[in-house]
Each structure stands twice: as structure tokens, then as C-alpha cells.
Image (cartoon, rainbow, N blue to C red):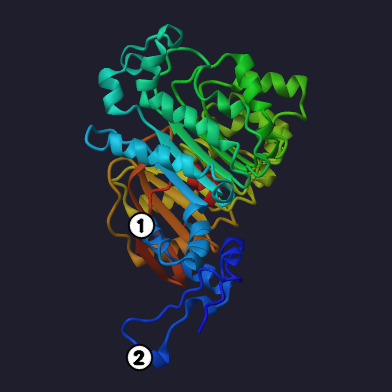
Amino acid sequence: MKSISAFLSARSKKNSQKHQKTFKSANSPSSLDYYPSRLPVELWFQVVSYIGDSKDLRRLLFVSREFRAVIEPQLYRVIEVDTPDDDTSYKLKTLQILALFRSIKTPWLAAYVVVLRIGLDRIKHCRQSCRICNEGTSLKAVHPSLMEDCRCEALDRKLGNILDKLPNLRTLSFWCRFRHPERGLKHTWITKLRLQALHELEFSCPTQHWQEKEYKRLLLSPCMSNIEALHLDVGDYSEALRSLFIETPDAPLPNINTIIFNNSSVLNQVISRRPIKKLVCLSTPAASDLTRAGRESLLRLQLLYVQDARRWLTTVEDRSPYSNLVYLGSVRMRSSVSEAEALGILREFSFLKHLKSIEVAFDSRIPSTWSSEFFTSLEALYQRLIRIYMAIRISGRTGAASQAVIYRKLGIGNWQQRIPSYLTYWQIATEGYH
């Protein structure tokens, strides 16, 4: 029986008559021959979506042309790249990354990429032998041959070359730990991107210190017009954003609704001028610092994450602006806190009637057990609460955690404990607690 490849992809349809194949199960009798391509293509896409291991997906690429047409969209949908920090793997890993960059420049593969996460660290080999990374030499003074030897430079150039070739890229998460010997010379591709589908941007380069005009160019760049979720960690851009709101109030970040701030000095301007629903503010200002327009804008908030929620909310006289909060973090506690003390702290937020998830941050360790009476009391305080995320944050910049536990409500008086993945601030803002 001939396989029908026309339903799987345009490429397999073009060559279907030439490359028709029959699949048979090696362990089944001939009367039970198995033909995968007889199944509807939508069903195969559904089956493949449950395969989380990229190694398994890569193996399936070589099964047949029909399988390749189904596997490629899933394999290239989410791409994660990070550079190694050891001598033994840097050559192989760097070559693999550059090969990946070359492959996704292919038009049909580039169209599959929806999420791209890239982390660039100074490769150990470069730190030992490269004048750029090791000595902070001015880039203009470096001979072109030395520039080619720097893997850091090669990766950054390749990345800038491919990004505009990803027409369906929706989420870009980029962080860099290169040393930058000159101002404004790294990652300038970010100001030139014209990705119409880009809606979520995390761009972190703490050693980058641009001038105000460069920050303005970034905030007014074409890709920013459609951004809905944003985290910029590129030095202090508050003055540039403040002046843009004065000069052209409708221009910067017109569609933003989720934002992570490292500096709260422009908090009032942003939340009063843009429909912010999810706010992560890492500098922990007091709620009393907000202007009247800022407080009125809080009614839209569904997620609020600050370093110390108690400090934020204890000075609040009118709590009605926070009535729609669904996610709240973080409530700081000592690791030695008793259940009675923990309930007393959490009772301070009982006016949040719609609260479903809350994060409790501990200083050194997470208490291992909580009694059923503790959760029963919580249910009385928060009728809609279904998740308690407990974590120890080791990085105030990214929110990286060293330990995390989540308690999920399965029913009245029934809470399940499990060890979740560590959620960064960006994941909390864009995905919520899960």
C-alpha cells in the first residue's frame, strides 16, 4: 500500500510520487502493517507536540521525508542557545551554535521559529587569549585578525545577521555577559530589528552603558512598536524614557502591558500612560511614592511583583486599586518563621479577594512541612487561592532561585506539594506561576 505524503507538507507533496515509502512494524505480522502517513497530519502534529526532548526530535527527522515535514516545525519552534564556560566544550559548542544560526537562515526553517532564548557568556578560551575580552582593548585598535579570533564577536555578529530573517518570532530572550570595552558598540542590531511578530522582549546586558540618545534609539526602534512584554536591563534608561514621554508621549512602547523595571524612577509615567496589567519592580519603591494618576492606574494590575510586598503595601491607605490582583510576590519571611507568624504576615493581604497565586520568599531555607491547619486557615483568608510558590532567590537581577517548592490546591483542605522549575522574574511576568 502506498503512503500518502501530500497531506503532510508542500515539500513532501512535491516529491511524493518519487519517494513514496511504506512503514511496517518490525514486530507485527504482515496483516497488521502500520502506515503512519495514513493518519491525518493534524494528529501527527498533536502527537509530536508531546515530545519534549530535542534529541528525540532530531532522531525522528531521519525516519522519512514525511516525518521530517512534521518534526521540523516542532524542533525549531523553541530554540535555546547558551555558550559554555569551560575549555573542553567551547569549540564544539560554539561550532554547533554557529551551525544552528546558519541552518535557521533557511527560509522555511526560519518561519518555524517562534521563541528564541540566547545566553552569551565570555567563553573561557577567549578570556585567556583574546585581547578584547581579557584586556578590554579598544575595538578600533584591534587588528581584524584578532577580531576573528574572538568567539564572542563571532557569535554576536551571527546573531545580528539572522534575527531579521525570523518572520514569526514572537518571543526573544537575550542576555549577555561579555565585557564591553567601548560604549554602544555591542548588540546594535537590536535597534534595527523589524520583526512585526515580536511581542515579548527580554534584553539583558548589564555591562552595556549607552548614552541617552542610544537609549532613545532603542526605545523608538521599529521592533518596539508591537512589544507587549518588556524587560530591559541595559543600564539606566529612565532619563531617556522620561524625556520621550514628554517629547512624544504616544511614541514609546505604545502596546506595552507587561513590564519589568530595575529602576522605579519612571514608574509613575509608565503605569499612568500605558495599560500595564503585569508589573515587576525590582527596586521596591513604596506605594506611597505613586502619584494620584499612578494609583488610579493600578486598577488594571493583575500581577504585582516587588522585592518586598509588605513594604509596598503597608503604607497604602486606599487599597481598592489593588482589588483585581491575581498574582502577588514576593512576601518575605525568615526561614525560622512559625506557622502562626506566617499566617499573621499573610493576613495583611487578605483584602486581595481575587488572589490566586502568592510567592513567599525565604532567606536561607524553605520550611519542609506545613500542617493541614495552616492551609485551612489560608483557605479562610483567600477563597480563590490555588497556588503558593515558595522560593529562595539568589539573584536580585534575574530572579534566579536556588530552591523552590509549590503547593497547589486540589480541593478543599487538599494541597499537593511538588518541586517545580525555578521561575525567573521574566517567566513570572510572561507565564505566571505554574
Label 2, on which residue? Answer: 29
Q: Is mark 1 on a helix, strand or loop?
A: helix
Q: Can you tell which quarter of the image residue 292 is in?
A: top right
Which quadrant of the figure has residue 332?
top left
Above/below status of 423 relative to 19? above
Q: Position of residue 117 (x, y in %)?
A: 47, 42
Residue 192, percent from left and from top? 63, 28
Q: Badge 2 local density, few (<14 within 10 Å), some, or many (20+)?
A: few
Q: Quadrant of residue 217?
A: top right
Could you say which disc has been placed on residue 324 in the image? none
Q: Mark 1 points at which residue?
A: 55
Examine the rendering and report whether any part of residue 399 can be seen: no
Frontmost residue, 273 versus 100: 100
Amino acid marked by disc 2: Pro
Horizontal side of residue 195 vs 333, given as left or right: right
Q: How far apart are marks 1 and 2 (CA)?
A: 30 Å
Residue 297: tell me if it is visible. yes
User: Residue 428 in the image: x percent, y percent?
Assistant: 50, 47
| Residue 421 picture location, percent across and down | 38, 53
- Name the one closer to the observer, 16 or 417: 16
Q: Which one is in front, 258 or 41? A: 41
Q: In this view, does 121 lie to the left or right of 102?
A: left
Which of disc 2 and disc 1 is earlier in sequence? 2
| Mark 2, secondary structure of its residue | loop
The residue located at (35%, 51%) in the rendering is 404
Mark 1 or mark 2, which is nearer to you? 2
**Residue at the image point whose x is 43% and y is 17% from the top:** 180
- Seen in the picture, residue 380 relative to 106 is either above or below; the reply is below
**For the view shown, which residue lies furthest in the left direction?**
88
Identify the residue shown where x is 54% and y is 53%.
350
